[in-house]
Image: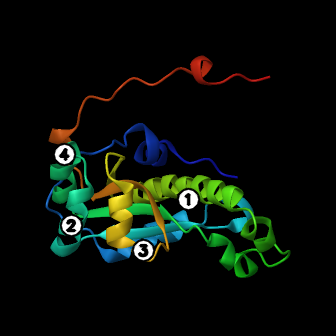
Amino acid sequence: MTKLDSAALDLLFNEARTHNGWSDRPVADADLAAALDLAKMGPTAANSQPLRVVFVRSAEAKAKLKPALSPGNVDKTLAAPVTAIIAYDPKFYDLLPRLFPHTDARSWFAGDPVGAEATARLNATLQGAYLILALRAVGLDTGPMGGFDAAATDAAFFPGGEAKSLFLVNIGHGDPAKLFPRSPRLDFAEMAKIV
């Protein structure tokens, strides 16, 4: 496999930042679709693909999201051109006959609600991280965050229980003047060992 060049690594990791302020430059639907098309290619257990996303853009949808936001997240979320609700489908396994057709993977999860929940949460979280990188890859900035009431968000956006929220990602073209200084990162030896 070919390595990415330094410009690509800078775009995805080294120079990429978590944004809290946004320009008024619009975000194209095509860029959101392109990013999701990239993110869905990342690995998930049994190709389960439990990620579900609502891209909140309209003033009406932002007003619906606002009561669920922690006070410190209101202004930056309302200013962001788009906010993605990263969620998971608790019944993802119903799609496994199509997504993982070479064995009966649905039976692994359908009778195991605890295992199914853990699998859905873990793999949708992975897919949410893939989406952050994919959004960066298509030229957008992101501001992932917690600091919201998941139950209130679910009641507003998933009233039938078809998905459950994990975290939010503000999306747009960031305002570099509103960035905090980059926080330190742990060294390799503090995070890992090779045995």
Gap between marks 2 and 4 measured at Cα = 14 Å
Position of residue 177 measured from the top left corner of the image (x, y, whole percent): 15, 40
In the rendered image, residue 69, in percent from the top left (x then y), is placed at: 25, 53
Badge 1: residue crowd in 10 Å (few <14, some 14–19, many ≥20): many
Residues under numbered marks 3 and 2 in contact, where contact means CB atoms less than 8 Å apart: no
**Residue 80 visible from this viewpoint:** no
Q: Which residue is mark 4?
A: 71
Q: CA distance from mark 1 to mark 2?
A: 23 Å
Which label belongs to residue 62? 2
- Three-letter code for the amino acid on which mark 3 is drawn: Ala
Q: Earlier in the sequence, mark 3 or mark 2?
A: 3
Residue 84: assigned label:
none
Judged from the image, the secondary structure of the residue bearing numbered disc 4 is helix
Q: Are marks 4 and 1 in contact (CB under 8 Å)?
A: no
Q: How many numbered circles does the render carry?
A: 4
At horizontal 57% and vertical 53% (from top left) the residue drawn is: 126
Indicate which label's residue lies in the foreground, 3 or 4. Answer: 4
The disc placed on residue 124 is: 1
Instruction: Establish if 29 lies above or below 81.
Output: below
How much space separates mark 4 and mark 1, taking CA atoms?
A: 26 Å
The residue lying furthest to the right in this view is 103
Circle nearer the N terminus (3, 1): 3
Quarter of the image holding residue 91? bottom right
Nearer the camera: disc 4 or disc 1: 4
CB-based contact (under 8 Å), mark 2 and mark 4: no
Q: Amino acid at mark 2?
A: Lys
Q: Residue at x 67, y 78 (%)?
A: 94
